[in-house]
Amino acid sequence: MQNWKNLMKEAQKMQAKLAKMQEELKQRIVEATSGGGMVRVSCNGQQEIVSISIDPGLLEEKDVEMLQDLVLVAVNEALRRSREMAQEELAKITGGLNIPGL
């Protein structure tokens, strides 16, 4: 019975750490660029895009397909970096254990 109580206590501690980590990840930002920095995308640690910046020079070219491609590349890279950052933070809490649903 004591082991069960200890296990529950540890699970509650981990849950509190996870909640704190999620709040911190909202504040942490990663950035990705494409087109030599002409498109910049910022994403927080919860995989939310927080800003997109497009160099006005790209708009002068009127090449919509190129602009779409550059935005797509930068968004995907920002999301990848955000997931990677979140996984690294999660590994610190779980000790590298792969817990389903986290």
Image: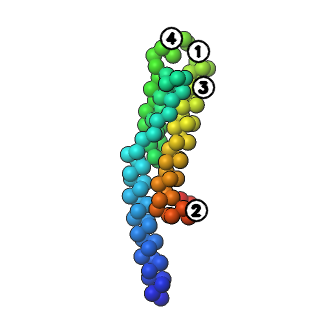
Q: Which residue is mark 2?
A: 98
Distance, label 1 to label 3, CA atoms, is 10 Å
Sequence-wise first label, 2 or 4: 4
* Label 2 residue SS: loop
First-in-chain label (2 vs 1): 1
Answer whether labels 1 and 3 touch (C-beta < 8 Å): no
Decide which of tag 3 and tag 2 comes sooner along the chain. Answer: 3
Circle 1 Cα neighbour tier, 10 Å, few/some/many (<14 / 14–19 / ≥20): few
Q: CA distance from mark 4 to mark 3?
A: 16 Å
Q: Secondary structure at mark 3?
A: helix
**Residue found at x 60% / y 25%:** 69
Residue pointed to by mark 3: 69
Among numbered discs 1 and 3, the one appearing first in the sequence: 1
Q: Are marks 2 and 4 in contact (CB under 8 Å)?
A: no
User: On screen, 102 above or below 54?
Assistant: below
Res 60 label: 4
Q: Residues within 10 Å of mark 4 (few under 14, many from 20)?
A: few
Q: Label 2 vs label 4: CA separation?
A: 48 Å
- Name the secondary structure under disc 4: helix
Calculate the distance from the C-alpha at mark 2 to the C-alpha at mark 1: 44 Å
Q: Which residue is mark 1?
A: 63
**Amino acid type of the residue that numbered disc 4 sits on in the rendered structure:** Glu
